[in-house]
Image (tube, rainbow, N blue to C red):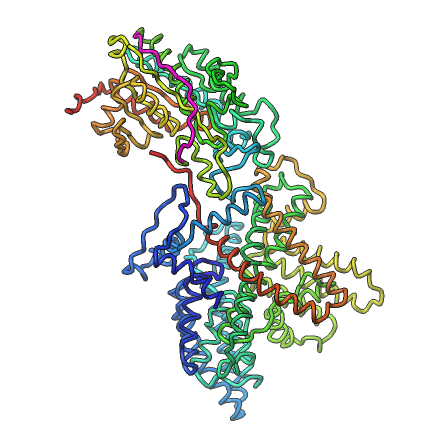
Amino acid sequence: MPFSSSLFIHAFLPLFFVAYGVTPKAYKNWTAIFFSCAFYAWGAPRFLPVVLGLAVVDYYLGRAIVSAVEREHRARAKALLVAGIVVHLGILAYFKYSNFFFAQLNDLFAFFHVRPSKWTEVILPIGISFITFEQLSYLIDVYRQDAKPSRRLSHYVLFLTFFPHSIAGPIFRWKDLEAQLSERTHSWTLVREGFERFTLGLAKKVLLADSIAIIADGVFALPASQLGPKLAWLGAIAYSLQIYFDFSGYSDMAIGLGKLAGFQFKENFNQPYVSASITEFWQRWHISLSSWLRDYLYIPLGGNRVSKNRALANIVIVFTLSGLWHGAAWTFVVWGLFHGLLVAGERVLSKQTWRPPLLVQHVLTLALVVVGWVFFRAPSLPVAFNVIRAMFGKTATEAVYPFRAELTPNFAMCALVVGALFTLLAIARKNASQAGGTVSGAFAVLRSCVMPILFITSAMHLTNARVSPLIYFKF
Amino acid sequence: MLYVLLSALPVLGMVLHAPDITIHGWWTIWDFPKLSNIVKPGYGFSHRFEWWFDQNLGFRGVAAYADNSVLYHVFGETKPNAPVKLGTGGMILNDEDTVYFSKTDVDMPKDARVMDLAARVDAMQRRLATKGAALIPIIIPSKSTMYPELMSKAWSRDLGYPRPTDTRIYTRFRDELKRRNVSFVDARELLLDRDNPALHTLNPPPKDVRHLVWGLDARHWTFFGACLTIQKVLGLYTQMTGKPLKPHECELRMVGDMPSHYDDYDLIELLNVWGVPPQAKVVPRADHPDREIDPKLQANAPSMLIVGTSFNWIVLKDTQAADAVKEVHFIYYNRLVVTWPSGKQEPLDTKTELWRRATLGKQLYILDLYETYLPADYTFKFLDDLDKALDEGQVPPPPEKP
């Protein structure tokens, strides 16, 4: 049940809000757990017992690790930690990567004319990538004594399954939420802020991302013979905007929903397209993931404390694995590797004193990010390379087959322009001074009036998207 | 609390059966999924529930109209995958007609198939002629053929004129019928003939006489357009069988204040948009004046089978109003058998008495060959079924007792 669905907006959300609101404070966590389990079970009923079972395992494992650490049995603590990591990564590997692994193996067998191995496709449980990383961070933080283990199983279950983040992040850290699970403030101000933030995310997703997606989907579906530079760039830019508004919109909704329950979640996006370098991009894009990778992969590999070449290699490794985390396909691996090489390259060039003009830095960064997104979006590497070749000069040899109104409908183009304008404005704002308090006050009043209208508009657009009448056969 | 109210309002509307705007169109009805199947593997309870929920959500019509209206008035479009597309000058058309207008080598039917259809029609016309019956094919134009200059660039390809479909489908098919001396009615030629005196009886004359035979916001031809076509068909029937019929007159009368569901301006309803009045405030009808008719001519009224598309609902009403035919059946896309004028429809099954009654022993067979669908598979299938029945020596069942 995605947040951007009529069932969630018009049934689940008001039900949760009312139920949570009338629940006495001492039991609010249980209400949240109940609704979170229902939410997860709606999409993946068979995997809910797996998630809950793993939560129980982590809870007791965490306590055992801390107990071992306190008794200075470091080796035992480490063994327990390793066991936990192996279990969680093993589960992730099985559910997420086994299909990919066997597909590659069978391709190899086919190349050598060997009979392919039989493999029954495994269904991917929703949210497993996010849940696994949260479980790993919990165990590692407990081992490092950066966080105390959960005193209550219910707290840990809620941490793992809370519906605003369980399916598509942000990736929470136990230490950031521990205190709020025990004690948090509920207020009408937070509720208003929560709904407004949810509305902002919903509008980004439904009105912008889903509209722009029509253009991106259309271009990426074209055969190479119909792709020229203009269309290729249009498709790549469209996807760059789509993925930003989709993902950041989802994070906005998650943060907003958290506020309804009194939680303050960290920001996951900080206007990444205002970046003047790829390094800066990764400080602003999917912050919960990039910080997780820094803390639990890059630093354990040695971080910046090793030799220069080793540090560069670590960067490339971390980003490549990040690509693989996003999806079990070579396109994601190449995307990660692409960014890894760019960040490593910037690290090397950072020693240089000369910098290109700021505008050039912005344009170059955006261009590289857009090119990277081509790999992320393309269904296969050949398609990705076709699009990139077209972007850099290969002209079309055939007329574009889809109608103009199918490929670039007016409202989708309008959404793309609006999205691009927001991005450019953000860049301009970043490089100029901020407005004063009176403007903020006026903006708050405007926001209070506009947000309800935006909510209604988004909800109506969503409802209409599911209305698909055909021409009726009259009788 | 405002947001909670906004959020919960549609569900409250659903539960309390609040009044809503009707969304026009046709779709699969999703029943409430069985609760006993909630954990049944493969049943897809959550998906079925979501489809049911979306379909029954309160104020769904209001949401659809509001969203469609913004798309229409602000962006000049219908929503993606809508069956209705916008042309220019107020024209609305079905998405199939936009596809037909711009077919290329990618989706053009094979030439051999087009020629084969002509051959099959020829063979069946000759076969039925030996039994004293007349098979009369009608080439019905696509709406994009009627109003090519109103096709929007957004929904057409730059293929020049004549369009590839004109040469490779229509002209090829028509010329092959002529070469084979098949008797047919070219309704495309008839309805596009702006000099036809029948279209110049009004004073003042309409801005565009084409509106008299096909409305800008109509899916199908008008009553008047259908009448003119059937007039030709019945004339050809007389030529082919030697049986004179009473004149099929089409007296043009403009009628106003028609209900929104009038035949045939349904495309405007399918926009599901506020603030779009019908193009035609008055619509053309064909009257059949009461005259003294020789009883012998009336007795010659043929039994009729029509095979084809939804264009024929108007034909059925027209021929009924004129009392021009009798014992009428309609085979709809070779899927349903409709008995007229009762309107009873049943799934097509060639083993049934109903099918034999509908197809065997008729005096007039009208084969609707809608340009957009040429060469339609359902036509081949019908011809195959009829050929097989005739080969087997099947006969029509005895007349039903009143």
Give the total number of marks visible in the rendering: 0
In the image, residue B253 lies in the stretch drawn in magenta: yes
Front residue of B195 and B104: B195
Front residue of B206 and A475: B206
Residue A25 lies, in percent from the top left, at 43, 81
Q: Going by the picture, which residue comes out furthest to the left?
A: B401
- Image: magenta residue range: B243-259
Say left or right for A23 vs A297.
left
Inspect this view and state whether residue A36 appears.
Answer: no
Tell me the residue at 38%/41% (across/down).
Answer: B26
Q: Main secondary structure of the magenta part?
A: loop
Front residue of A291 and B235: B235
Residue A309 lies, in percent from the top left, at 73, 70
Residue A117 lies, in percent from the top left, at 44, 55
Q: Is A362 located above or below residue B290 in the figure?
A: below
Front residue of B384 and B230: B230
Tell me the residue at 38%/44% (across/down).
Answer: B27
Q: Going by the picture, which residue comes out furthest to the bottom?
A: A71
Q: Going by the picture, which residue comes out furthest to the right?
A: A354
Say left or right for A453 vs B339.
right
Q: Which quadrant of the view contains residue B304?
A: top left
Q: Quadrant of the C terminus of chain B?
A: top left
